[in-house]
Amino acid sequence: MILSSLLNIPENISRSAMKIIKLKSQLIKTLITKGNFTIAELSEQTYLSAPTVTKVINELLENKIILDLGKIDTSGGRRPNLYGINPKSGFYLGVEVNRKSLSIGLQDLKNEFVKIDEHIPFELDGTHGSLDELCLRINSFIKESGIAKTNIVSACVNLSGRINSVKGYSYNYFYIEEDSLSHTISTKIGINTYLENDTRAMAFGEYNCGVVNGEKNVIFVNMSWGVGIGIVSNGNLYYGHSGYSGEFGHSPLFDNNILCQCGKKGCLETEVSGWALERIFKDAVKSGNCSLVANKENINRIDLERIIDAIITSEDTLAIDIISTLGEKMGRYISLLINVFNPELVIVGGVMSAVGDYLLFPIRTAIKKYSLNLVSQDMELKLSELGSRAGVVGACYIVRNKCLEQLS
Ligand SMILES: [Zn+2]
C-alpha cells in the first residue's frame, strides 16, 4: 500500500472503513509535519486513545507507510518504540518550465530529492508540439527514476504569466484547448497535476527550505526574463481574488513609449528585467560601447544568459554598469513594495540574481534612499539561497501542501 491509495478514496466506501482511513490520515499527517513519535506521544498529539493509535500504527507498518525506528532510551521502565513516516511510500513531482529549459525533480515524503534534472533543453512556445514535448520529457524523467507513477502523489507544473491554479488554466502559455491545462497534463502523464505561477512557486521554495528563517511576511522578487513577485503573508502564499497577484513587472511606472510583452507601454519590465537588460546591452554595444564578450559583429548572437555569464566570469564592465543601473531602479520600486506591505524579509531571486552583489548592492542602496526609514529599518534584504532550483523545490512543496490538505 502507498500513500496515494489514502488520497483517492472510493465513493462507495463503508462508514467504518472511512473512519479507519481518517484515523490513518490523521497519524500520517502528524508524522509528515512533526517528525517521529512514540505511540504515547502520538496519542497525545492526536487526542486518540493509545489502543486506537497502536491498532492503526500496526496497519500502517504492515502497509509499509510508516517505519518502526526501534526503541528509544528512557530514564526507566519499558523502552517505547519510535515510529516515523516511510519517506519512500510517496513522492512529489515538481516541474519548472522556463523559456529555454526545464527542471524536473522528484522528492520523497521527507522532501529529499531522489532525482532531479536541471537545465533540460526545451523551447516554450505555447503550441501543441511544445506541450507534447513537455509531457514527453516528464514521462521520460519518471521512467528513468524507476519510481512507479502510482507512487507519485501528484505533480505541480510552474509556468510564468497568469495562472489560475484553482481552475488549472494558464493564460499566457498553452491556452490552446477548452479543457484546463492541468487536466490535459494530468491525462498525458497519468498523474494528478496542479499548475502554479513560477514566481509564487519560487517564493514557496525559499519559504520552506531556502533563505527564510522563521519570517512569516516575505516578498520574493523574481528577476528573470520578466519580473514578478511572490507574496507570503502570515506564512501563507497570497493569491489574490483570482490567483493573479504578484504581477509587479506590469506596473505602469515609466513614460518611455516602450511596448511591453503584455501589450501595454511603460511597464516596469520594459526597463528592469532580463529582456530589458538584453535590449539595453545590445543597444549599448551597437552604439559603440565596448565589451569583453560582444562587438557589433556578434551582438545578435548574445543573449541574457551570456550577459550574466560575462558579469560573473569576466567582470565585463559594460554589463556591470547596466545591471547596476537596473538594480538602482529596481530598489526604488522595491521601496514602494516595502512601504505598502511592510515585510520582514525581501528576497531577490531569479536568473539575474546569479550576479550576486552587483545587483544586490544597488538595490540595497536605493531601498535605503527611497523607502520610509521606519518601515525598512527592521526589514532584511537577502539573495535567494536556492537559486535556479527554487521553482522546482517550491513545486514539490506545493504538492506536499495539497497532499496534507487532503489528509486532514
Ligand atoms: Zn507589461
Image: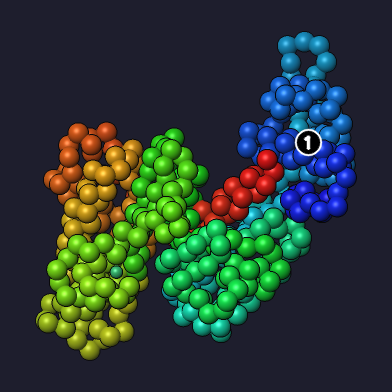
Q: Residue 260: horizontal and vertical position, in percent?
A: 27, 73
SS type, badge 1 = helix
Q: Is residue 352 above or below residue 293?
A: above
**Mark 1: which amino acid?**
Leu
- Residue under pointer 1: 23
* Residue at horizontal 43 percent and vertical 48 percent from the top: 238
The picture quadrant where one finds residue 80 is top right
Q: Nearer the viewer, residue 400 or 340?
A: 340
Q: Is residue 147 left or right of residue 134?
A: right
Q: Is residue 397 above or below residue 76?
A: below
The picture quadrant where one finds residue 81 is top right
Q: Does the closest atom of ligand 1 sit within 8 Å of the Cβ of label 1? A: no
Q: Residue 394: horizontal and vertical position, in percent?
A: 51, 53
Residue 24 visible in the picture: no
Q: Quadrant of ligand 1?
A: bottom left
Q: Is residue 56 left or right of residue 141?
A: right
Q: Residue 234: horizontal and vertical position, in percent?
A: 43, 38
* Residue at horizontal 81 percent and vertical 22 percent from the top: 50
Residue 150 visible in the picture: yes
